[in-house]
Image (cartoon, grey):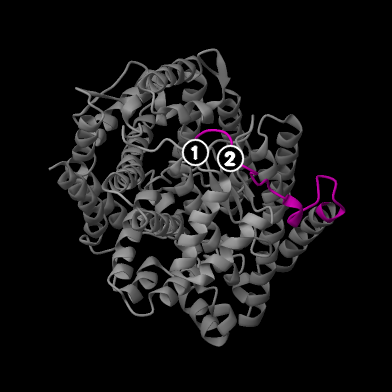
Amino acid sequence: MFHLPFPLRDANAGSGSKDLGNLPEWDLSDLYSGEDAPELKRDLDWLETECAAFATDYEGKLADLDAAALLTCVQRNEKISAIAGRIMSFAGLRYYQLTIDGGRAKFMSDCQEKITNFTTPLVFFTLELNRIEDDALAARFAENAELARYAPVFRRIRAMKPYQLSDELERFLHDLGVVGDAWERLFDETIAGLTFDIDGEELNIEGTLNLLTEQDRNKREAAAHELARVFGENIKTFARVHNTAAKEKEVIDRWRKMPSAQTGRHLSNDVEPEVVEALREAVVAAYPKLSHRYYELKRKWLGLDRMQVWDRNAPLPMEDTRTIPWAQAERMVMEAYEAFDPRMGEIAAPFFSKGWIDAAVKPGKAPGAFAHPTVTEVHPYVMLNYLGKPRDVMTLAHELGHGVHQVLAAGQGEMLSSTPLTLAETASVFGEMLTFRKMLEKAETQKQRKVLLAGKVEDMINTVVRQIAFYDFECKLHAARRQGELTPEDIGALWMSVQGESLGPAFDFMEGYESFWAYIPHFVHSPFYVYAYAFGDGLVNALYSVYAEGKPGFQDLYFEMLKAGGSKHHKELLAPFGLDATDPKFWDKGLNMISGFIDELEAMED
């Protein structure tokens, strides 16, 4: 079915305080002017007619099409995806601006149902493509270069061939997808509607999570206990959502004869299971030299005998607590992007001036941050919850990197522009690294350098160590759910089993922390997505080391990689840089960069 494109929230999106200047808001009119826009009605009508016509013209006939006719078929299918994507992008972005608005929720749901109904007759397309013999398809590619351009799409579709069900069952699952989406919406609306009482002030989840990064330790502790209390009061709802989503996945995986719960994610990421396992093993083996070692340093800096969970993201005692106004954040990121290559600045500039960013924290707005590519004929939109902390500047650099990547890849067209999630984090993490290095270069004192280095190490630990711990939690959760219903206590025990291992011996865990799995959106929206963060960070650290070594023509190679979108496998994309993610030693490059930063921090202690 055609799903609302899930907003890929940055798992480490931070927040801060007020007096931020003029924060930009989205102008969605580049998609449609409103719910009642005549163009929206026109596109829905076209979609209904074209989907029916497409089925009439091609169902049962794909194997007999010559190369030119197959190309026309693929291009018609691509246009259907573009129109459906435009409609759902508009409906979804309006919803994420105000998730508690019943009218917006209904509008999105109605659009989703219509598009699901319209596109049900198209289920045959991938099923029939997979029945064409390899030799016959290769002959058509050889005959028509424009058709051959779509070969990577065919390859990814055909990777699902062993797990394909009957046409009738595939149509049934397509229709049933709307029900699964309802559980995701229940999760989103529950999270957005939570309220937290901190010293008599009512806050939403974004504002409360932000307090975990406050200088005042009492505020951090109060926020942690209040999060635990509210999660605890709602834990049955969250457990029900997770149980249902995991069971639905298990049923579909079983019918498809998928060998593991993770297989579907690896297929959609166009990455081999052994590559992900090599990443996971490398990171888990590195816990002692990364997170365990860093948090022991941080414990000393904070003057604590034991770290508590509310100290994990605490600022350092010597850290500058200033608020960074929006205009300054924009300058910092743009300067870093332009210093790398003026072309990067040119692509990024319209995001700030044309209503492509929605930055303010507002009641009912979805938490976190994301960059949504919409469709290749329009442009991406970036959502932040900006409150002026240095970490927020890094989040802006991260999401803007996604936006630049999406703009560059748009030239590939609707079916080839979408980058597998493992590579989707490349430009975002690289944008962060550029911004960090520019800030480090401008550090005037040893203290400033130490704070910047520590902040970067924390972000990398959150991106690599924490996300692999999340991935392990999900693996355990889905394996356990296959044995039966899980109580909130069961899920909490699985959560705690990965927390101590990943964070290390410096920490104690308060009562109630076992419920903190409840608010992570990726577990519900996009199972096993989280390893893409660690994959992206490791890949970028290796890429950046090639850049730092002064490889000739690096910028041009980098832009070509981003422009490729989803048209090439990660092995092809990394080859020009002399990198190979299938080499087990590849991941050590990235992990050694983090370890090197910690070495430098330890040396400052002497």
Q: Is residue 6 visible?
A: no
Residue at point 24% right, 53% down? 591
User: Magenta part of the protein: which range?
Assistant: 15-40
117 is higher (above) or lower (below) than 226: below
Identity of the amino acid at label 1? Answer: Thr
Q: Is residue 569 above or below residue 32?
A: below
* Magenta stretch encompasses residue 180: no
Identify the residue shown where x is 31% and y is 35%: 318
Image coords of residue 358 (percent x, y)? 63, 45
**Contact, mark 2 vs mark 1 (Cβ under 8 Å):** yes
Q: CA distance from mark 2 to mark 1?
A: 8 Å
Q: Quadrant of the C terminus?
A: top left
Q: Secondary structure at mark 2?
A: loop
Q: Residue at x 66, y 71 (%)?
A: 75
Label 2: which residue? Answer: 20
Query: Which labelled disc corresponds to residue 364?
Result: none
* Quadrant housing residue 418: bottom right
328 or 510: which is nearer to us?
328
State left or right for residue 77 relative to residue 308.
right
Q: Which residue is mark 1?
A: 323
Q: Secondary structure at mark 1?
A: loop
